[in-house]
Image (spheres, helix red, strand yellow):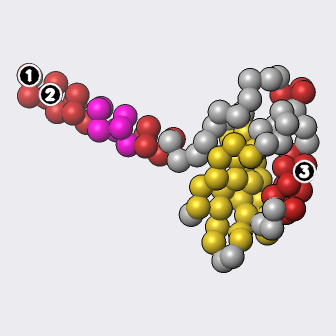
Amino acid sequence: MNTLVRIGLVAGVSLGLAMSAALADGYKDCTKIDKAAWKPASEAEAKAKAAGYEVRKSKIEGSCYEVYGVKDGKLFELFYSPEDLSLKHTIAK
């Protein structure tokens, strides 16, 4: 019985670590203001286009606008604050 408990604990910890790594892919902390005060997502896309990115799609990720764009043949994830549309983080894929 003791061996089964250890196997279960190891499996549970392994699963937890795998899930936390999967969730840590993006940047999720851009603002603390209420969603009702957020600027439109289309404005974040417009900022990315003005910076030279070909915008593929955008979505809300945590409290950020996440914009997927291509520039110089590379894919980027751009994280904008919906509060003031400042660029908070960029990930090259």
* Residue found 58% across the figure and 46% down from its top: 26
State the SS at label 2.
helix
Q: Do the residues labelled 3 and 1 touch (CB within 8 Å)?
A: no
Residue type, label 2: Arg
Q: Between label 3 and label 1, give the one nearer the viewer.
A: 3
**Residue extending farthest left:** 2
Horizontally, is 92 left or right of 33 in the view? left
Disc 2 crowd rating (10 Å Cα; few below 14, some 14-19, many 20+) is: few
Residue 84, horizontal then vertical, whole percent: 85, 36
Camera-side residue of 87 and 57? 87
Number of marks in the rendered image: 3
Could you tell which of marks 3 and 2 lies nearer the N-terminus?
Answer: 2
Q: Is the magenta stretch mostly helix, strand or loop?
A: helix
Magenta span of residues: 12-18
Crowding near the residue tagged with mark 1, few <14, some 14–19, many ≥20 C-alpha atoms within 10 Å = few
Crowding near the residue tagged with mark 3, few <14, some 14–19, many ≥20 C-alpha atoms within 10 Å: few
Determine the secondary structure under disc 3.
helix
Image quarter of the N terminus: top left
Amino acid of disc 3:
Ser
Q: Which of marks 3 and 1 is nearer the N terminus?
A: 1
Disc 3 from disc 2: Cα separation: 51 Å
Q: In this view, does 34 lie above or below 76?
A: above
Inspect the image, locate mark 1, and give the three-letter code of the amino acid beneath it: Asn
| Residue that numbered label 1 is attached to | 2
Observer able to see residue 60: no
The Cα atoms of the two marked residues, 1 and 2, are separated by: 6 Å
Residue 6's tag is 2
Identify the disc placed on residue 42.
3
